[in-house]
Image (tube, coloured by chain):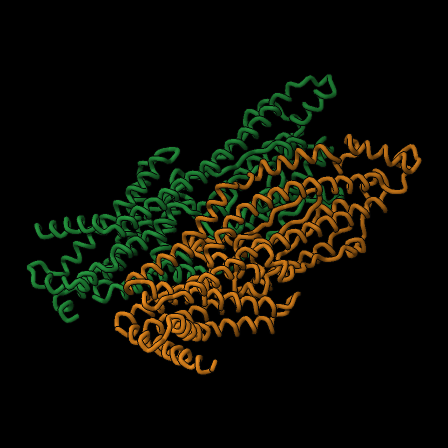
Chain colours: A orange, B green
Amino acid sequence: MALQKLYPLKALAHKEMITVWRDNTFRAAAIVLSLLLLAAALTGIQQYRQEAQEREAAAQQFRQQWLQQHPKHPHIAAHFGNFAVMPLTALSLFDQGLNAYTGKVVYLEPHKQNEFSFKPSEEQDGTARFGGLSMALLLQWLFPLMIVFSCFNAFTAERESGNLKLLYSQGVSFTLLFTGKFAGRMVLILLLLLPCILLLAGACLFIPTAQPMAARVLLLVLLYTGYLALCVALSLLVSAHAGNGRTAVLSLLLLWMVSTILLPKWAASAGNNLYPLPDKYEFAAAIRADIIQGIDGHNPQNARALALRKQLLQQYGVDTISKLPFNFEGYVMQAGEEYSSKVYDVHFARLQHTLALQNRFTQWAGIINPYLAVHQLSMALCGTDYYSHLHFQQQAEAYRRYFVQQMNGDMKDHSVLGDWDYKASATVFNNVRPFSYTPPSVAVALRPYATGACSFLIWFIILLGVVSSGNHTKL
Amino acid sequence: MRSTFAVFMHECILFGRNRLQVWGVLFFIVIGGYSISYGHAEIARENSRRQAVADSIRQTQLAHVAALQADTLQPAGKYRYETAALPSLVRFSFHFLAARKPLPLASLALGQLDVTAPYYLLNAQSLYIQTLKGEIANPFQLKAGNFDLAFVLVYLLPLLIIALCFDVLSAEKEAGILPLLRMGRYPPGSVVLVKFSFRWLLACAVVAILSLAAFLTAPIPLLGMSAVLWMFIVCVYCLLWHALLLLIVSFNRSSALNAMLSLGVWVLLVVVVPVTIQAQSKLRGASSLSLSTLMRSRNMEESSTAMQQALNQFYQYYPHLIPADSTRPAFYYFQGYSAFLYNTDREAQQQVAAWYQAIRNRAQRTERLLFISPAANTFLLLNHLAGTDVQAGLAFQQQVAAFHRQVFWFANNALFQNRYMNAADYARIPVFEPPVMQVQPGWVAGRLLQMLLMAGACVVVALYQLQEKKLTHA
């Protein structure tokens, strides 16, 4: 019985596939898009290989510089500093996300938490603002446009030729007709998507990564299949409700323009206007003002350092700091470091809050605009979104505190009061483990975008409702 | 002539009756208005921040000058005096502001302003420690880009033109008027041309309204040569899009197909081509990552030999500073560190210059391909006019580097003369002069000529297509 019901659906889908495939516009668009996908894939692979190698080599070079530095006082060695180079995720060959706008490297030094340096966009001219060629861009922007062009007359052409009445008179319901058209077109879209899926699978198999990528790749395939399915369904519905092909194509193009160009840009600019970021000077001045009130690691005569001295003298039952079992200067240095870290935590938390408020605008806009939701989810899955960058930033900062603590610890335990000629050996530098980054799990990466993911479900439920309640006498 | 005027007037009336088109134009003007307010707000914010920092720095500088008069008999007064008079302290505690000053047109085309630093606070420490560290920014916002007037004109204006023009001929055909037109005295091809002329003038009027609103609402109203050039560039861009639409329309296909083809061309010229140009242009011969180590704190090797080596190298550049006798001057160690800073920056300078040159070369390679992308071409032209392009950014960096040399010598001059700073030194506080951005007329004319040639080629083919015979055949 069920199979009997499926037979007309299969026939409708088959007929739809043949019709669409015979359409020259669709074939031309499919060829152009396939070529662009190929170009994007090759560019992505080449860029990934080159950039990943460059970053890997730089990270190794910085490590060697750390290990091979001249013997020097541990605190001066801490000031020599380390660098954390943001590694490229393998999936950035698919979606470059924010890579061009987040710095590549951060200098890690005592007393200061620096911003990332060398955004690739600083090296580019105005053409960079048109976007970077990537498979994600093509799937997010151009595939929906191709769907619009191939679907706008799916119902209007049938109506204008009189086929629609014929089909309804034979007992075909609107829901069945819609499902047939949808299935037929989705098969072709999936065929076009296949090279991307294969490439992602290949990346998953052949590029060694810190974390397994299979889950991310699977979710990416589902995400884009769902997005394109949504585009097909929406285009078919507009075609079914439009009076003629011209109205359908214009309505769909307007929808495409608003959702992919206007709304994302407006949401970002509105967030920026409503919650402006602090100026770097006032931000640094506020941090400095708070740090001054605390312990100055370089000045043991500072008021808080003196209080600390008194406390330590009482604790160890000695009358002078030279009798303490460790170098008081090293102790104060670390105390100052911990104090400044707390100050940085407070100020950076405020900054992150402002950034989150700015981005929340776009995240909420993702509820009404599936493009925005896909855009963000895709970046998150590829590890090229803002939160992945933040995750890296937090680990780099944790490493900064770790290696500075190691150096201050050596100063405290192995040098004597006032001895700034003490030099840490190569073993001390060797004992500082190299920086290594562990990317977040898929669940952690997707958590900030729960709203966008939910919007997908809502859209599908709405479309399902509209299709199932479709009345063929009116349509 | 009378017929031309009649068709023109008829188009005016038809446009007024077409609510969809009128609403489209009004919607575009509203978006343009938003973009103008966005651009002005961005520049106003940068200006007010720069002013606040300048005021703060000025206060600190005045405090230093006042400290020279402090009562040195009191410990606190002596401490204050030394912070202002000891060149070894002043070289790192006295800051100078080097800020860019956006041109009045910058609020209309923000260009690369958001990805580059608006100002630097400099002292005699290594230049690169102070300039290579990153800025506070929201990468998501940077990627979304600026909602400025240049974006509206380059991205959205062609869409308005498409909406106004895609059915110029097909609508006549679909309404059955084309055969009637063919029977009249006035050739249908000429009717189409007049219709397009009306639409081009309409688009230019919309652009003029928006641009004038932007010029007049700018903090310093803009009505000079740059404003005229801005209008001219945008009108040429409009003309090119009308020519492209005329070409599409001249093939006399259905409205739906025209809409699809027009949008296809828009996607090609505004999205695909610029993105592809960008993808193929790589930075060659230099890498920013190799500059990372320049951000490191400058620590000298802790030995007298290293100190003397640094000074010897420094004296090669400034032999007149070599001390007359062999006795160690009072500021010997401080001089050694300053010499070390000077030497290391001098070595780094070549590395940084190579990086800037690589960026410049990349921009030039991209420019060579711009003739195939009128959108990117116009965008860069507007950025160039507004002084917000990559070249302006590099010019600012160069000016900052030149200014840093003055900053270095402000305190080090007294340091190498083994004397304290005095009021005469403070009377010569260097002030940063932002680079004067000049429009390159040859470059602008070349870009405009490319667009005009492309428009001309489209019009010639379209006129051929619109010949009576061809239309009849279609």
Kindly identify the residue that appears in the image at 63 percent across and 39 percent down. Answer: B125
For the question of whether residue A342 can be seen, the reply is yes
The vertical placement of A39 against B336, above or below, is below
Q: In which quarter of the view is residue B271 placed?
A: bottom left
The vertical placement of B293 against A307, above or below, is below
Residue found farthest to the right: A317
Kindly identify the residue that appears in the image at 49 percent across and 60 percent down. Answer: B282
Would residue A57 appear left or right of A130 to someone viewing this image? right
Residue B301, image x, y percentages: 73, 46
The vertical placement of B294 against A370, above or below, is above
Kindly identify the residue that appears in the image at 14 percent across and 57 percent down. Answer: B191
Residue A199, image x, y percentages: 53, 72
Q: Which residue is at the front of the view, A357 or B300?
A: A357
Q: In which quarter of the view is residue A177 placed?
A: bottom left
**Quadrant the C terminus of chain B occupies:** bottom left
Q: How many marks?
A: 0
The vertical placement of A397 against B187, above or below, is above
Would residue B111 appear left or right of A106 to someone viewing this image? left
Would residue B438 appear left or right of B126 to someone viewing this image? left
For the question of whether residue B390 can be seen, the reply is no
Q: Which residue is at the front of the view, B245 or B125?
A: B245
Q: Which residue is at the front of the view, A216 or A297?
A: A216
Residue B104, image x, y percentages: 39, 38
Kindly identify the residue that appears in the image at 66 percent across and 19 percent down. Answer: B70
Residue A419, image x, y percentages: 83, 40
